[in-house]
Image (cartoon, rainbow, N blue to C red):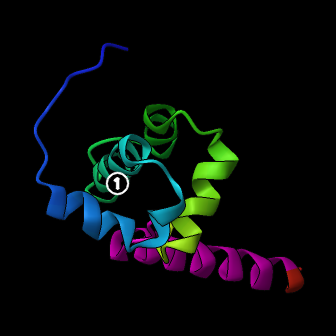
């Protein structure tokens, strides 16, 4: 992966230095913050975000958890689908009991 040099205001670096990412060096702090943003904005998958940080998937998962960021996004459509599936399963089970 190619690297790009960009100008980042020192204030942004300092703010990241006061976050959970404070233990990381400045370059890693910015790389991790960008990867987290890309993941939370659903622009990249969990696996791709981990790759961008250079972290093993389990370590990136732990980082997200420490930041209070859910790894699994369970939206209303998924919930509704699951509720329909549960309803169908209950119907089948009650029909099977009646035999």
Q: Start and end of the magenta stretch?
A: 73-96
Observer-nearest of 64 and 93: 64
Q: State the residue in front, 76 or 20.
A: 20
Depicted 71 relative to depicted 54: above or below: below
Circle 1: is it few (<14), some (14-19), or many (20+) Cα within 10 Å?
A: some
Q: Residue at x 27, y 65 (%)?
A: 14
Q: Is mark 1 on a helix, strand or loop?
A: helix
The quadrant of the picture occupied by the C terminus is bottom right
| Residue drawn at (19%, 61%) of the image | 12
Residue at (41% x, 77% y) in the render:
80
Describe residue 89's horizontal placement relative to residue 3 as left or right: right
- Main SS of residues in magenta: helix
Q: In this view, does 89 lie to the left or right of 67?
A: right
Position in image of residue 38 (x %, y %): 29, 48
Based on the picture, tell me whether residue 11 belongs to the magenta stretch.
Answer: no
Q: Mark 1 points at which residue?
A: 33
* 85 lies above or below 3: below
Instruction: Choose between 31 and 92: the one closer to the eye.
Output: 31
Position of residue 39 measured from the top left corner of the image (x, y, whole percent)? 36, 51
Does residue 92 appear left or right of residue 85 in this picture?
Answer: right
Q: In which quarter of the image is residue 5?
A: top left
Report if residue 33 is visible in the image.
yes
In the rendered image, the vertical position of residue 67 relative to residue 97, given as above or below:
above
Residue 72 visible within the image: no
Name the residue located 68 percent from the left edge and 74 percent from the top edge: 89
């Amino acid at each position: 992966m190619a690297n790009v040099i960009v100008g980042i205001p020192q204030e942004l670096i300092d703010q990241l230095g006061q976050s959970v990412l404070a233990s990381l060096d400045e370059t890693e702090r910015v790389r991790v913050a960008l990867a987290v943003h890309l993941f939370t904005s659903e622009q990249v998958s969990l696996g791709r975000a981990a790759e961008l940080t250079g972290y093993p998937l389990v370590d990136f998962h732990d980082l997200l958890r420490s930041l209070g960021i859910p790894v699994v996004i369970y939206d209303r459509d998924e919930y509704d689908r699951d509720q329909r599936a549960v309803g169908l399963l209950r119907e089948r089970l009650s029909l099977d009991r009646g035999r």
